[in-house]
Amino acid sequence: MSKLIKPVSLVIVIILSLCCNRHPSVQYSHTIGVTYQNLQNEFVINIQDAMRNRAKELNVKLIEVDGQGKAENQISQVENFLALDVDAIILNPFDRYGSAPVVSIAKREGKPIVVVNAVVVNLDKADAYVGSNDQEAGRIAATYISQLLKGKGDLALIRGPNGHSAEIQRTEGILEILKGYPDLKIIFDQSGNWDRTQGLELMENWLSTGKPLQAVIAQNDEMALGAQKAIEAAGKQNDILVIGIDAIPDALRAVKDGKLCATVFQDARGQGILALELAVKLSEGKRVDHTNYIPFQLITKENLNK
């Protein structure tokens, strides 16, 4: 058992544990510790909801904590999970480098660990990974915009947090496609940190330059919706295309209303359910596949009802 326990954090985790278990007399089949990268993000909340629902069906007790966008929080949280002697750990990493010690700590103490949604640099050391190929999401978004613009125009790219695995991989996918379209140029490129307000502020700043712009590729829907709001406020709704990634409910409504040209569906529910199921199997000593991809899909107004 690890000795690196932070007393205050441990108290918080215990309180959360008790809150999650309203019926102390219930005998759970397993106890799983989950650290989320940031529960201010709607997509992460969707993963959490799916995981909670599946845990109820499987009679699994979840001890859940919010990393609040800080890798160091996730490191201390996993130490506290060990103090509570959980059966397995699920990591939704905030940073591919900063959150990597969580995997090392779990393996050092012999606890199964499943990484979900984002990746860490030592992903091969984890027992399993559940997510989607983020390069593919970038390729899908860039391909669709390229087709709509017929291979010519000026673009803005709103990235996720610098160094986040999804930011890196989605950027790689976007740039891979744009290499084939020399007349499509990125004239604005900055991180919006997955945040709707930051997406709006970036777009306001870029619009104020007066430079012509034909499309915005945002690496998640929150930033896309922020950018779209700024575009609409500037009266340029019919001039600038906006595409996002994740297919959160607000984005689907925006696609239906013609405010976003498309979004790329990432299955939060599928990721949450499968991550929990694999954690349970691992805690029972069963073998599982290490890498488990759930495909992305382009969502437009035409296929939205499907």
Image (tube, rainbow, N blue to C red):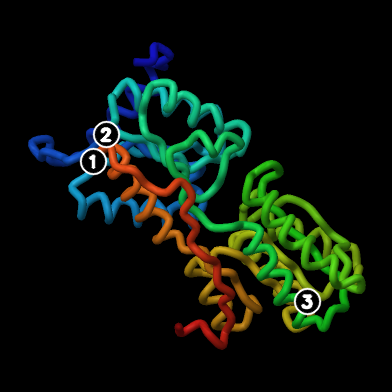
Residue appearing at x 34%, y 43% in the figure: 287
Q: Quadrant of the N terminus?
A: top left
In this view of the protein, which residue sits in the foreground, 282 or 210?
A: 282
Disc 3 secondary structure class? helix
Label 1 neighbourhood size at 10 Å, few (<14), some (14-19), many (20+)?
many
User: Which disc, if any, is residue 17?
Assistant: 2
* Upstream in sequence: badge 2 or badge 3: 2
Q: Nearer the viewer, mark 1 or mark 2?
A: 1
Q: Residue flagged by tag 3: what amino acid is it?
A: Ser
Residue appearing at x 46%, y 24% in the figure: 105
Label 2 neighbourhood size at 10 Å, few (<14), some (14-19), many (20+)?
some
Q: Tell me if I can see residue 235 in this picture.
A: no
In this view of the protein, which residue sits in the foreground, 173 or 76?
A: 173
Q: Quadrant of the C terminus?
A: bottom left
User: Which disc, if any, is residue 225?
Assistant: none
* Upstream in sequence: badge 1 or badge 3: 1
